[in-house]
Image (cartoon, grey):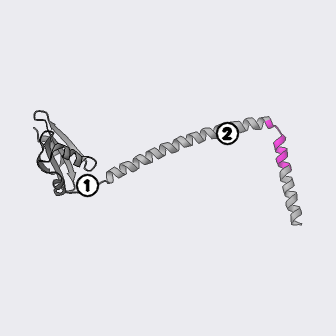
Amino acid sequence: MKNLWIGLGLMICLFLAACNGTSDTSNQVVADTNEVDEASTSEAEQTENSLEAEDESSLEIEETTNEEEQVTFSVKELEAVFYIGMNYTTYLDEVTGVFEIEQTYVDEHSNDMLDVFEAYDGYLGIVYSPDEGIKQLLHYQEANEASSYFN
């Protein structure tokens, strides 16, 4: 008896589906096309919005990462790497990719330069020239103190 009711229910569903499918097919196609266009437009907008959201979230992650990056070395540890008399090429090799230069100041008269590095316990200024290498190591409490060195 259950099988009879299930079969009868399925036949009614098929009959209703067939009746809906044959009436006014041209109007349904137009309506369906409009729905597809609206759906694809909204999908495109959603994709664009999601890409913008991903870009913003990746920027926030990068900014957070940069803010969280803290210097893990001291002035003494910097002095162990950089020493008076180190030639310019070696200095560039040591700096590249390892340490971040906070500020660079240039003395146009003597062609000397001053790079300021941040440490967790202060700042180290390195005075050098391309011809003579490192000439002097200077200690600062703030990075902007080095700005008056060449004046």
For this orientation, the residue located farthest to the top is 109
Q: Magenta stretch mostly in which secondary structure?
A: helix
Magenta span includes 22? yes
Q: What residue range appears in magenta? A: 15-25
Q: Please state which of residues 13 and 86 is positioned toward the viewer in this rendering.
A: 86
Residue 130 image label:
none
Q: Please determine whether, in this image, residue 29 is positioned above or below residue 6.
A: above
Query: Residue tagged by mark 1?
Result: 71
| Type of the residue with mark 1 | Val
Q: Residue 21: which quarter of the image?
A: top right
Q: Foreground mark, 1 or 2?
A: 1
Query: Residue tagged by mark 2?
Result: 36
> Residue at (45%, 44%) from the top-left corner?
55
Q: Please determine whether, in this image, residue 78 is positioned above or below residue 109.
A: below
Residue 138 at x, y = what percent? 12, 49
> Residue at (55%, 42%) from the top-left corner?
47
Q: Quadrant of the C terminus?
A: top left
Residue 8 at x, y = what percent? 88, 58
| Type of the residue with mark 2 | Val
Magenta span includes 105? no
Residue 42 at x, y = what percent? 60, 40
Does dot 1 land on a helix, a strand or a loop?
loop
Q: Residue 109: which quarter of the image?
A: top left
> Residue at (69%, 36%) from the top-left corner?
34
Q: Quadrant of the N terminus?
A: bottom right
Mark nearer the N terminus (1 vs 2) = 2
- For disc 1, the neighbor class at 10 Å (few under 14, some 14 to 19, many from 20) is few
Q: Please state which of residues 24 and 124 is positioned toward the viewer in this rendering.
A: 124
